[in-house]
Image (spheres, coloured by chain):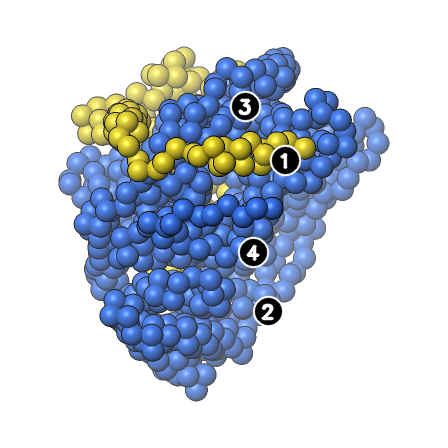
Chain colours: A yellow, B blue
């Protein structure tokens, strides 16, 4: 097991062949099949590392794909299918975790950080303004320096 | 013998690093020139020793010395030479050796090319480098020695994971590590600056080329990994928001932010503390990335605990480096006084906006990657955080930045005017709208993000071109003057424009592949035809054959465009008997508009029927071209005059007013 973990350098936990949906699973109705694919992309292959059932060729993923299609054929809506799968396997099966007390920080965190960042920047500018109002110790340009600056700028323009 | 020599070289290198970590630092503190001088030869010696050790490891792989555990576990006599060499770093222990080798390479490069650095400052930088190295040497020697022997030696090895036996992945780790480890230089510069309590324009100018180099390599490393996933995993996916991918993406985000804030430090003498913090964060993310991939913590917290020695060491090292540097920052950071003042709408403001987006993006990725572990540790319900989460959170965060990216370069330093800047972008805006509408009209039910992506890509690309046009005053000044202005554009500016333009290409590629991908999965008899993405694929059957260390099934597709033969595709399905693992070798024909992508699956029945998967992946090639353009831009920026000539001199705190020479 340790060898297995170690041998894998960068991306490693996909099942090797990466061949997922098989021709025999595909539904005849293209609209229904498209919905099945859509749902599959959001469901985790429970025995894989971070892989949706749509991308995995593990047999459990295949079972789930068939289950999703069976429910769709039985007339379930997309939400009903997902609710059904979650009722059997728990929230772990969802690649996009639901919004609840356990995932509050996960969902709200990034947006709180944006707000915190904006506030920090606003504070920075306020401080920046006050510092600007203070004398910096730099003397204003002398007449000769101003002329020199104008000359240089004119030179650069040409 | 070779293995022992390598092992001894590592031990010796560790002692050299201990000398390098202490004496020059003390010398710099107490102003002892001889001790300061010690840093240079110590760096060279460390490089020589790690090179030797690394060479020893490659040698035992090349001669298939199965008395070395590492070789047994990752090699096989039948393996092609390239993968024998690449096998040396395609595993935990070997990759750590690669890590310290690259670390000492960068250290020696600073010693060699840092002639214009003040000696005391350089000594401190090299000392910090050596401190990082000590952590890695200890980790290797005590928990992960690549030179460990085994008796009795087995007759043959257990082979390298076949997925890793691929040219793209052979060069992916060295490239990625050049990026990861490159940020150690920015880190050491930051720590040295904190020790000295001073950050100025010269500091920013020294840090920049090193950070750029790391950024270029890291971009290349990430793209190589992505490219590998694209062709090797067999369905044209190129980014999965997998924790190991996120691990390489987080330092990239921090490094990109650092590149932009360092510009503000150099030009405007402000945002100093923030820039130092970003340098610390960038390298901390590199360390975290190395270790979350290496420790097995990702599979589960429990896998992490199965090897407590490594796990505890890793945690200690991370805590020491990250905690120590942040503590130093908290102590010395407030002393870094900034003098530059600017308005929110200004070039500095735009760069700061980049930093805001990059860091919150980084935080979102970090949160998503570690959250399931965190919940697991505190004993909550197991949850998954996968691609749909990241797409929902990360992409909306990035969009405003892409919009701002086109406008930023038009703003003046200190105080910019937004309206004139936007006025100059009116053509870019119109082009983006037209492109978005055109993309929408050919929408095929894919993600609407594709349409937005195309519009953003055109907006950014047109914005970059508009900026260059403005800079040379094209059509506003006589052509000769425009040409002269064009020639005078500094390389760093070209670098920025190219990097931004490359980003636009990458976005176009992502949008195309995400929004308009077509696929067809079916069983095909020889002679059958399927129609995908405007091409007709005729399956001409498959035959079995043998490769150097695998068996294969070789399929043949004749692809027709409007009835004419366009290309013949030969996808393979390989089986590696030693590891008992299959791999898919997709056949890909790349065109500028999209990739034709064919995969052969399992045989069905006996009449030559096979499962086949045909994909059309639009615009994918632009992701790789765009990355190369970005990397080239980074390289061009490194070669800018100001990094080569006019050795940056530290401004004295209270310099006497310079007398203006009369020209």
- Residue B84 percent across, percent down from the top left: 54, 68
Vertical arrangement, residue B566 with respect to residue B30, above or below: above
Question: Separation of disc 3 and disc 1 at Cα?
Answer: 38 Å
Chain at tag 1: A
Q: Earlier in the sequence, mark 2 or mark 3?
A: 2
Q: Secondary structure at mark 4?
A: loop
Q: CA distance from mark 3 to mark 4?
A: 38 Å
Q: Quadrant of residue B20?
A: bottom left
- Do the residues indicated by labels 3 and 4 lie within the same chain of the protein? yes
Tell which of B436 and A119 is nearer to you.
Answer: A119
Q: Furthest residue to the front?
A: A143
Secondary structure of the residue carrying numbered label 1: helix
Q: Residue furthest left?
A: B378
Q: Position of residue B75 (x, y in %)?
A: 49, 69
Q: Is residue B33 above or below residue B633?
A: below
Residue named by callout 1: A155
Q: Are marks 2 and 4 on the same chain?
A: yes
Residue wearing tag 3: B456
| Circle 4 residue | B645
């Amino acid at each position: 097991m340790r060898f297995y973990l170690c041998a894998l350098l960068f991306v490693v936990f996909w099942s090797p062949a990466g061949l997922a949906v098989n021709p025999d699973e595909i539904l005849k109705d293209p609209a229904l099949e498209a919905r099945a694919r859509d749902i599959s992309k959001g469901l985790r292959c429970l025995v894989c590392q971070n892989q949706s059932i749509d991308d995995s060729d593990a047999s459990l993923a295949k079972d789930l794909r068939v289950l999703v299609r069976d429910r769709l054929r039985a007339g379930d809506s997309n939400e009903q299918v997902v609710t059904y799968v979650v009722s059997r396997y728990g929230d772990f099966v969802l690649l996009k975790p639901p919004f609840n007390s356990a995932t509050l920080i996960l969902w709200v965190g990034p947006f709180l950080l944006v707000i915190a960042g904006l506030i920090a920047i606003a504070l920075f500018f306020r401080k920046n303004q006050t510092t600007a109002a203070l004398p910096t110790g730099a003397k204003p340009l002398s007449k000769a320096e101003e002329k020199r600056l104008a000359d240089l700028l004119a030179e650069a323009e040409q | 013998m070779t293995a022992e020599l390598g092992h001894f070289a590592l031990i010796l290198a560790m002692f050299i690093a201990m000398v390098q970590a202490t004496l020059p630092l003390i010398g710099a503190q107490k102003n002892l020139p001889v001790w300061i001088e010690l840093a240079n030869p110590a760096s060279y010696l460390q490089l020589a020793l790690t090179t030797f050790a690394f060479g020893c490891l490659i040698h035992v792989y090349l001669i298939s010395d199965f008395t070395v555990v590492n070789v047994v576990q990752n090699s096989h006599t039948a393996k092609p030479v390239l993968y024998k060499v690449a096998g040396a770093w395609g595993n935990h222990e070997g990759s750590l050796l690669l890590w310290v080798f690259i670390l000492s390479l960068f250290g020696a490069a600073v010693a060699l090319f840092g002639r214009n650095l003040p000696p005391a400052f350089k000594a401190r930088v090299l000392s910090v480098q050596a401190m990082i190295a000590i952590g890695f040497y200890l980790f290797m020697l005590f928990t992960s020695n690549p030179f460990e022997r085994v008796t009795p030696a087995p007759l043959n090895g257990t082979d390298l994971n076949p997925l890793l036996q691929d040219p793209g992945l052979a060069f992916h780790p060295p490239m990625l590590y050049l990026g990861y480890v490159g940020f150690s230089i920015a880190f050491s510069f930051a720590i040295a600056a904190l020790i000295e309590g001073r950050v100025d324009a010269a500091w920013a100018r020294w840090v920049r080329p090193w950070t750029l180099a790391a950024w270029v390599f890291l971009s290349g490393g990430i793209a190589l990994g992505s490219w590998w996933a694209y062709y090797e995993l067999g369905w044209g996916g190129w980014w999965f928001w997998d924790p190991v991918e996120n691990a390489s993406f987080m330092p990239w985000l921090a490094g990109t932010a650092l590149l932009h804030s360092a510009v503000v430090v150099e030009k405007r003498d402000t945002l100093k503390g923030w820039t130092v913090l970003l340098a610390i964060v960038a390298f901390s993310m590199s360390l975290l990335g190395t270790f979350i991939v290496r420790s097995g913590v990702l599979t589960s917290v429990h896998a992490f605990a199965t090897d407590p020695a490594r796990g505890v060491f890793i945690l200690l090292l991370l805590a020491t480096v990250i905690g120590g540097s942040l503590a130093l920052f908290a102590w010395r950071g407030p002393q870094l006084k900034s003098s530059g003042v600017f308005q929110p709408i200004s070039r500095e403001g735009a760069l700061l906006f980049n930093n805001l987006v990059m860091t919150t993006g980084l935080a979102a990725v970090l949160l998503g990657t570690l959250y399931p572990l965190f919940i697991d540790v505190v004993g909550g319900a197991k949850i998954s955080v996968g691609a749909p989460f990241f797409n929902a959170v990360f992409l909306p965060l990035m969009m405003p930045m892409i919009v701002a990216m086109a406008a930023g370069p038009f703003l003046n330093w200190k105080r910019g005017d937004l309206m004139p800047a936007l006025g100059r972008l009116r053509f870019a805006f119109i082009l983006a709208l037209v492109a978005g509408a055109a993309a929408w009209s050919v929408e095929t039910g894919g993600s609407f993000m594709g349409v937005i992506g195309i519009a953003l890509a055109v907006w950014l690309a047109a914005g970059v071109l508009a900026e260059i046009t403005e800079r040379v005053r094209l059509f506003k000044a006589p052509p000769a003057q425009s040409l002269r202005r064009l020639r005078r554009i500094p390389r760093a500016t070209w670098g920025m424009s190219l990097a931004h333009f490359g980003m636009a290409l990458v976005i176009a590629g992502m949008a195309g592949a995400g929004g308009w991908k077509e696929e067809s999965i079916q069983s095909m008899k020889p002679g059958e035809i399927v129609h995908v993405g405007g091409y007709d694929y005729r399956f001409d059957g498959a035959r079995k054959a043998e490769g150097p260390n695998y068996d294969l099934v070789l399929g043949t597709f004749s692809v027709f465009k409007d009835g004419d033969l366009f290309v013949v595709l030969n996808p393979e399905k390989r089986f590696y008997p030693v590891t008992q693992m299959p791999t898919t070798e997709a056949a890909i024909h790349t065109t500028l508009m999209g990739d034709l992508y064919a995969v052969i699956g399992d045989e069905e029945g006996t009449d030559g029927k096979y499962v086949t998967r045909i994909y059309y992946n639009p615009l994918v090639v632009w992701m790789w071209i765009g990355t190369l353009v970005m990397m080239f831009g980074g390289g061009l920026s490194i070669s800018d005059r100001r990094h080569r000539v006019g050795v940056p001199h530290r401004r004295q705190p209270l310099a006497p007013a310079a007398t203006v020479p009369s020209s």
